[in-house]
Image: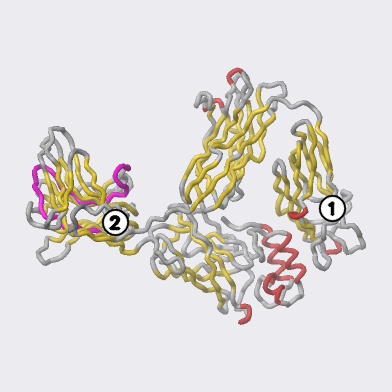
């Protein structure tokens, strides 16, 4: 049964000055009642103040807790002294329940000195719920606990279980919540019946709403099949990915489940899941050299791979010798060494092929984007077949490559030759040095190579039915990271951003005492979905009100980025373009980042757009009654506290211009994410 409850908010003494300019109220439901909804505050009695105008900042209703924040823009003389809010509640099971106001999370703002009222008498209301509990089901998220790294994807499963024997589910609506800062939703699947692991066609979607900005998912499905064919245990798989380190809970906030039972609606019990996102291990490009002069193959640098009975040795002359015995089996077979140390970003890798026995076989020196045992989807390199040199670019990551190319360069079995692989940006280069004094000669360039990291292999391969014993000797390997994607100096960084920014309301250069503002910046790698931590730097303004400063990060120079800018008095701005523009101030919006960065200095002029004011210290990512009250109470003041917290346009005083900037920000309210 549902019931409407009226909550009254009023000062204990009313002498004309106790007016209410804003509220931020949190109320909880304990025991066997739940909160269904609540109305915006209205003057009491209803209709007593028709001129009252306000803006709703928050109306967040969950089953056991509701929060509403509301601020009024009227002059003080028109504000109400008593407000009322109507709450709708529902009995969930026989027993008792209580509505409780959370004093620690509730603020009532007025117009008097000090602005925020102290909470005096707070009445709490008890309720009793009659009736018998009906059939029940369990709603669960599994697995119960999960630990993953930043950037790592993993599945969570929502499922309805413990359905009574012989009964089914005809409809369900669920509201899920998660920490939007820690998790990203990749996909939400369609329901199936866990009993049959199928029956997808039994469900008709009513609603699938995924709000990444709020961390909410609302799902509603209906089954119209005959009652004896209703699904028993609907389940939905949700693919998620960790965004940053931290722990949280994937929760079922509210649910309604109906079926072929006399009561129509099942009682529900809920089992939520927790997750722990840990730091990602960021691979670093690793340079090394090897002259193969040891007594055995250096296992810290290489792994040996053989598809048959091949083997590798390190010779007394300091060479790597790869052997593949003869075989009666038909088909290609390989033996090779693979570097254990990853190459990332721009690199150069070279080796000397000393000698070979060319018996309808080929030798190869190649770069692959995956280690042995994984499916290679991109690579490039050399192979020598029947005494002729070939180059090739391969893999589904490079669909437009022309395939192997025979360069008609004869290669002697006993004359050494140097082979070099290079990657710079999206360009793959293959070069040879015949060791005649001319140095390296580039023989192939591929401009659209998309693979960014991988490993080098060198070895021999049977080509078909001959399968004779073959061997090759290599020497003097080196791999060099030309600009590693991550530098080991966290305090500096391999990239430096020299930024120009524009902030709402600041039209010129502030006085020297006010011409410094701490700006927070972070980067989101669009390839990995991983964001950096915020870094802060002091910016200063010129005569046109353009703020300049610089800040450094460790970042992969081969990725594309979204830039986030958070001013000291401003909502966060999401920027996807290196030169963003807008036709009206504050209207720039973007989706996926397209900013490219290079090692060293990056000059980005972002002053073509403005960051909107509104989120004042201490910042919480939203414009609320707190921010409005802070400016209102400081109007006309020039003390240090007011100037540092409420002088939004940095003109040395807090006045109606600052207040107008905050009121205008109510149309946006939240940080851009």
User: At which x and y percent is residue 306?
Assistant: 22, 42
Which numbered disc, 2 or 1, marks the residue that appears first in the sequence?
1
In this rendering, would 473 be left or right of 40? Answer: left
In this rendering, would 258 be left or right of 189? Answer: right
Q: Which residues are magenta?
A: 348-374
Residue at the far front: name it: 295
User: At which x and y percent is residue 446?
Assistant: 26, 55
In this rendering, would 86 be left or right of 200? Answer: right
Q: State which quarter of the image contains the C terminus.
A: bottom right
10 Å crowding of disc 1: few (<14), some (14-19), many (20+): some
> Residue 9 — which label?
1
Q: Secondary structure at mark 1?
A: strand
User: At which x and y percent is residue 35?
Assistant: 75, 41
From the image, tell me which residue sits under label 2: 447
Q: State which quarter of the image contains the N terminus.
A: top right
Q: Residue at x 21, y 58 (%)?
A: 477
Q: Nearer the viewer, mark 2 or mark 1?
A: 1
Image vertical order of residue 673 relative to residue 610, above or below? above
- Please tell me which residue lies in front, 555 or 199: 555
Q: Is 442 part of what is drawn in magenta?
A: no
Q: Residue at x 10, y 39 (%)?
A: 468
């Amino acid at each position: 049964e549902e019931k409407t409850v009226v909550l009254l908010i009023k000062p204990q003494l009313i002498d004309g000055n106790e007016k209410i300019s804003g509220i931020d109220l949190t109320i909880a439901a304990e025991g066997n009642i739940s909160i269904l909804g609540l109305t915006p505050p209205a003057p009491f009695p209803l209709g007593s103040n028709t001129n009252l105008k306000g803006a709703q900042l928050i109306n967040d209703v969950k089953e056991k807790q509701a929060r509403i924040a509301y601020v009024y823009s009227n002059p003080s003389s028109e504000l109400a002294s008593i407000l009322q809010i109507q709450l709708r509640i529902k009995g969930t099971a026989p027993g008792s329940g209580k509505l409780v106001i959370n004093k620690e999370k509730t603020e009532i703002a007025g117009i008097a000195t000090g602005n925020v009222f102290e909470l005096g008498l707070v009445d709490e209301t008890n309720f009793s719920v009659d009736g018998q509990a009906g059939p029940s089901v369990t709603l669960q998220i599994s697995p119960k606990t999960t630990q993953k790294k930043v950037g790592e994807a993993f599945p969570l499963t929502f499922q309805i279980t413990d359905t009574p024997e012989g009964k089914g589910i005809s409809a369900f609506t669920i509201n899920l919540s998660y920490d939007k800062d820690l998790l990203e939703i990749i996909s939400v699947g369609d329901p199936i019946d866990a009993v049959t692991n199928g029956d997808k066609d039994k469900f008709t979607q009513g609603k699938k709403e995924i709000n990444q900005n709020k961390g909410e998912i609302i799902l509603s499905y209906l089954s119209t099949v005959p009652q004896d064919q209703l699904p028993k245990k609907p389940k939905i798989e949700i693919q998620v990915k960790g965004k940053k380190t931290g722990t949280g809970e994937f929760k079922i906030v509210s649910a309604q489940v109906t079926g072929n039972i006399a009561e129509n609606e099942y009682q529900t019990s809920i089992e939520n899941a927790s997750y722990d996102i840990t730091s990602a291990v960021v691979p670093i490009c690793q340079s090394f050299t090897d002259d193969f002069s040891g007594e055995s193959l250096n296992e810290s640098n290489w792994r040996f791979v053989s598809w048959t009975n091949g083997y590798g040795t390190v010779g007394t002359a300091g060479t790597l010798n790869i052997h593949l015995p003869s075989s009666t089996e038909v088909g290609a077979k390989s033996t090779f060494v693979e570097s254990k140390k990853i190459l990332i970003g721009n690199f150069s890798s070279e080796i000397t092929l000393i000698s070979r026995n060319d018996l309808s076989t080929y030798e190869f020196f190649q770069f692959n984007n995956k280690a042995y045992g994984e499916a290679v989807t991109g690579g490039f390199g050399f192979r020598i077949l029947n005494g002729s040199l070939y180059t090739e670019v391969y893999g589904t990551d490079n669909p437009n490559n022309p395939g192997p190319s025979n360069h008609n360069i004869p290669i002697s079995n006993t004359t050494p030759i140097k082979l070099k692989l290079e990657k710079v940006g999206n360009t793959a280069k293959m070069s040879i040095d015949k060791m005649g004094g001319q140095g390296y000669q580039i023989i192939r360039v591929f401009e659209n190579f998309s693979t960014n990291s991988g490993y080098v292999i060198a070895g021999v391969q049977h080509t078909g039915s001959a399968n004779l014993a073959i061997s090759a000797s290599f020497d003097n390997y080196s791999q060099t990271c030309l600009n590693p994607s991550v530098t080991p100096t966290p305090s500096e960084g391999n990239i430096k951003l020299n930024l120009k920014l524009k902030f709402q309301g600041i039209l010129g250069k502030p006085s020297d005492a006010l011409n410094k503002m701490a700006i927070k910046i972070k980067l989101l790698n669009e390839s990995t979905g991983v964001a950096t931590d915020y870094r802060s730097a002091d910016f200063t303004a010129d005569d046109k009100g353009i703020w300049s400063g610089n800040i450094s990060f460790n970042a992969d120079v081969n990725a594309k980025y979204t830039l986030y800018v958070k001013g000291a008095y401003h909502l966060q701005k999401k920027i996807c373009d290196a030169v963003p523009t807008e036709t009206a101030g504050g209207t720039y919006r973007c989706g996926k980042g397209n900013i490219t960065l290079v090692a060293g200095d990056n000059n980005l002029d972002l002053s073509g757009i403005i960051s909107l004011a509104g989120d004042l210290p201490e910042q919480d990512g939203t414009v609320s009654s707190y921010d409005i009250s802070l400016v209102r109470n400081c109007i006309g003041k020039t003390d240090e506290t007011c100037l540092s917290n409420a002088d939004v346009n940095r003109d040395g005083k807090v006045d109606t211009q600052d207040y107008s900037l905050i009121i205008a920000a109510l149309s946006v309210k939240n940080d851009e994410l």
